[in-house]
Amino acid sequence: MPSPLKYLIIIALPLGVASCDSKKKSSREDRGSENDFFKESAATETLDTLQNELNRGETELLRKFAVDTIPWQKWDSAILEKARVRQTPVLLYIASGLSEDSRSIAVEISERKAIRDTLMNKSVCAVADIQVNPELGILAHHLSAEINQPTAFPTLVWMSHEGSPIAWLPLSRTSGKKLDIVINSSSAMVNEIWKSDSRYTVSNSRIDNGRRQARFNSPFIEGDDSSRMKIFRTGTRGLSALYSEFDRNIDHSGGLMPTSSLELLSLGVLHPDLTTQVRNKCSLAVKEVSGQLISQALKDQLTGSYFYARRNTDWSLPIFSKNLETQANLARVFLNGGTITNNNEMISEGKNLLEVIENDWLAKPRSIIAPLSNPDRDGSFIINGDTLEKVLSESEIKLATLAFSLKPNGNIPGTVDPLGIFYQKNTLRRDMPLSEIASKLNQPEEAVSTQLEQIRKKLLAHRQEVTEFLSEPLIGAETFARVVRAQISGANALNDDTILVKAINSASLLRKNYTHPSDGLSLLPVDSHFIPARSKDYSLCALAALELYQTTLDPQWLQWSTTLMDEALQKLSRDGLPLRELPKSESIIPLAIHNRSMIFSDSSVGMSHHVFLHLGTLTGAERFTDMADLIAKDLSRLAQASPVNHSDFIISCSRGDSPLVAVVQGGESAEGRTLLKSLNSPKISPFISIRGDNASNLLKELPQIPELSGNASVSLFRDDKLLGSATIPDDLDKLLSAEISEKE
C-alpha cells in the first residue's frame, strides 16, 4: 500500500512541473490576456446552491452516487460554467463500473465527514463513468503516465473552469484514515495554490494542456517503413518471442485478457513467410495460453463466463468483475484460433461462450456484472474451509477439493500474495480433466459430472446470497458490435447457419437501436440516452457490418459500413490526423484525444485502420485508402517496437499492402454458398477481402472478371490483376495457398 506521503508527491508532481516550466515567464502578458473571470473579487454563485444530479445519470454506477450527501454533478457541458460562476476548480471523479475501488472509495468519501466537507466546500464535484465517457479513461491513463504511476480508477482530477487539468490523483486500494489523509492533503494543496494565485494556476494549466495536446496530435511518421506486410511479420515475430513456456504467458505486465495477442499469434500460425520455428512458437503460445484461460481462475468455473482482468502476471488471482466485451472477444478468439490450430478444446469453449452470452448477458441485457461487496472477504469468489463446510457436504467437499484444485493453505502463490492476505484461501480452477478426477475417485465420469454440477449450483447460490452486485443494463454500441463479430465467427468456424441468423438479427438490432435518424450513431441505445458515438464505436460497428457482408454478400451491410465511416470522417477527422475520440462540439475539456495504443482494450486508431483498409480495398475510395495509409505510417514504428500494445493494428496489417480480393459469382447457388463458406474459414478470411457481384454501385470496378460459365466461381485479384479462378473448393484451396503470401 503506498504511503500518504507518496500520494502527496504524486499530486505535487504535475503542479511542480507546471510551475517550474513557466513561473519565470509568468508573464504579465499571460496575465493581461486573461478574460474577466478574475476581475471580480466575489463569485456570483456559491457551492451550497448545487444539488446532487446523479439521479439522472445514464448508468447504474452513476445512479449509485445519487443518494450521496455530496452534491455530485453530471459531467456535461454545463460543468465548467458552474465552476466559472463560483470561481472554484472542478473536482472530477473518474470511475469505472469494473473497478471495485470506484465503488468502495465513493462510499467511504460519502460516509467520512472530514473528506465530504473538504470536497463540498472547495470544489464543484462531478462524476464521470468511462462507459459513458471513454475518452476520460484515456485521459486518466495519460495523466497517470505523466507522473509514472499505473492507471487506476477512480482517478481524481482537479481542473480549471477552462477544463485544463491542474492536478490529479490515481486512487487504488486506499481506505480508512489513509483515505482521509490522501484526499484532504491533496485537496488542501490544490486549494492553497488556487487561493494564492488562481489566475496563474489557470494560465499554467492551460499551457500544460497545450503541450499535452501537441503530444496527442503528433504523428510518428519520420523515417518509418509503413509496409503493412513488414509490420505484420515483424510484430508477429516480436510477440511470439515474448511467450514464455515456463509460465505459459505472453504479457508479463499483468492486466487485461490477452485476446488481441492470441488473435495475432493465431494468424502467425498460418503465414507462409514466417519461419517454421516462429509459426510453431505461435501455435504453442495459442494452445498454452488458451489452456490457461480455460482452466485457471480467470474463468469463473461456476458460470462459464470470464473475469475481465487479472491482478498479477499469472492466472491465479482475477479482478472479480466481468463485462460482455470480454465474453464476446474470447468467444471469437477461441473459435477462430481453435479452427486455425485444430484445437477442439478452444472451439468447444468458444461455442459454450456464445451460449453464455445469449443466456446470461443478452436475455437480461447487461454489459457489466461486478460485486459491490468485497469478494476477498465474503467467501463468494475467494473460497476457504469455512465456506466449504457451510455450503457443501463432506463428500462434496472431497470432490470440490480435487476438481477445483483447492489446498488447505490456499492455492494462490506467495509471489502473487507476498503479504499473505489470501493465506488459506482459494480461487476456483480446473487443473485436472474429468476423466482423471473420476479415476482418482473410482467413480464413473457421468456420476462425477452430475455431482460437480450440484456443487456448482450450491456455490453459486451461496455467492448470490452473500454478494451484492452492480448489474449494468446498458450495452454500448462497440460492445454490441463485438457480440455480432463473435456470432459471425461462430457461424463460420462451426459452419452453423442458425448462428449466422442470430448474427444477422443482432446486426439489425445494432443498426436500429443505436442509430438516430438525424444525429447518427449513438454510444448507447437511442431510446435510453443519445450520446454521440466515439471513434471506436464507429470502427467496431463498421467492422461488424463488413464481416457480415463478407459472410452473406448482402450489400446492405457494405452500405452501412461505408455510411458509418463516412460519418466518422465527417465528425471525427481533423487536420489530416487519425480519428479523434469524439467531436469537438462534444468535448468538454480542450483536448482532442487520439487513442493510438491498446490501453483498456483495442485502440481506436488501430481498429479504424482495419476498417479503412478493408473498405478502401473493396470500394477503391481514396478517402478510405488515404486514411489507412496515414495510420500505417503513424503506427509503424510503435507497433513493431511494442506488439503487445498494438496487436489490434498489426492484425489489420495481415491483409498486406496489396490485399487479395476474392470475387464470388453465383453466390446464391448451392455451389456459390459452398465456395463462400470456404473463403470465410478463419484460416482464410483474415488475409482477403470478399465481394459479391450484386453491389456494383459501391464496389471498385475490376477488369477481367471472367464470365460465369457454371453455377458459381471465385476469381482472385491482387492490384486489380486476375490471379486465377476456381469453381470447386479444392481448386480454390490450391489457388489461395499459392497466392496468400504477398510477394515483395
Image (cartoon, rainbow, N blue to C red):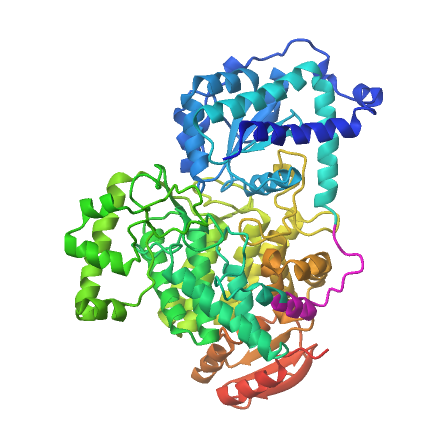
Residue at 55 percent across and 52 percent down: it is 253
Does residue 546 lie above or below 32 as drawn? below
Residue 625 shows in this picture: yes
Where the C terminus falls, by quadrant?
A: bottom right
Q: Position of residue 365 (x, y in %)?
A: 36, 48
Residue 623 shows in this picture: no
Residue at 62 percent across and 70 percent down: it is 655
Q: Position of residue 257 (x, y in %)?
A: 48, 55
Question: Looking at the image, which is closer to me, 215 or 249?
Answer: 249
Q: Position of residue 733 (x, y in %)?
A: 53, 85
Q: Tell whether 490 sits left or right of 405.
A: right
Please count the marks in the image: 0
User: For residue 564: magenta?
Assistant: no
- Magenta-highlighted residues: 219-237
Question: Looking at the image, which is closer to me, 426 or 272?
Answer: 426
Residue at 78 percent across and 30 percent down: it is 21
Residue at 58 percent across and 67 percent down: it is 240
Q: Position of residue 287 (x, y in %)?
A: 45, 69
Does residue 340 lie above or below 153 as drawn? below
Question: Looking at the image, which is closer to me, 165 or 144?
Answer: 144
- Extreme-top residue of the structure: 41
Q: Tell whether 300 sits left or right of 90.
A: left
Q: Tell whether 579 sits left or right of 25.
A: left
Locate residue 47: give its quadrant: top right
Does residue 681 lie above or below 372 as drawn? below
